[in-house]
């Protein structure tokens, strides 16, 4: 059975390679961020608390993609 999956993608510049590896680390921000580095780590914690996974990647044609997947119950 396939998991339940939600994918959110955009057509922007994507996520810089070095930032992609630390994207879900608490308090990690970059020079263009106005945040505190907590939103994505909290989102991942909530998804994992419900048995799911949250991941991010760059799309081959440009932009970023976030995927939330929950196992089929």
Image (cartoon, grey):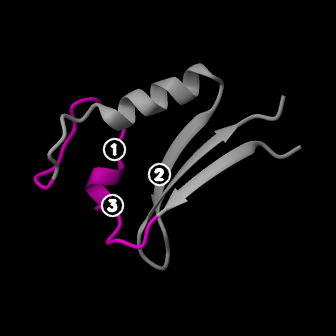
Residue denoted by label 2: 56
> In which quadrant of the rendered view does residue 26 lie?
top left
The reply to whether residue 25 is visible in this rendering is: no
Residue denoted by label 1: 23
Marks 2 and 3 in Cβ contact (< 8 Å): yes
In the picture, the quarter occupied by the N terminus is top right
**What is the x, y in percent for residue 11?**
42, 73
Which of 57 and 11 lies nearest the eye of the viewer? 11
Q: Magenta span covers which residues?
A: 10-32
Separation of disc 2 and disc 1 at Cα?
8 Å
Q: How many marks?
A: 3
In the picture, the quarter occupied by the C terminus is top right
Q: Secondary structure at mark 2?
A: strand
Left of 32 or right of it: where is 15? Answer: right
The numbered dot on residue 9 is none
Could you tell me which residue is drawn at 28 percent across and 62 percent down? 16
Q: Residues within 10 Å of mark 1 (few under 14, many from 20)?
A: many
């Amino acid at each position: 059975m396939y998991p339940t999956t939600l994918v959110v993608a955009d057509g922007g510049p994507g996520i810089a390679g070095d930032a992609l590896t630390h994207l879900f680390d608490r308090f990690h921000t970059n020079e263009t961020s106005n945040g505190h580095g907590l939103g994505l780590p909290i989102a991942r914690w909530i998804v994992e608390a419900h048995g799911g996974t949250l991941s991010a990647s760059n799309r081959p044609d440009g932009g970023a993609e976030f995927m939330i997947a929950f196992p089929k119950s």
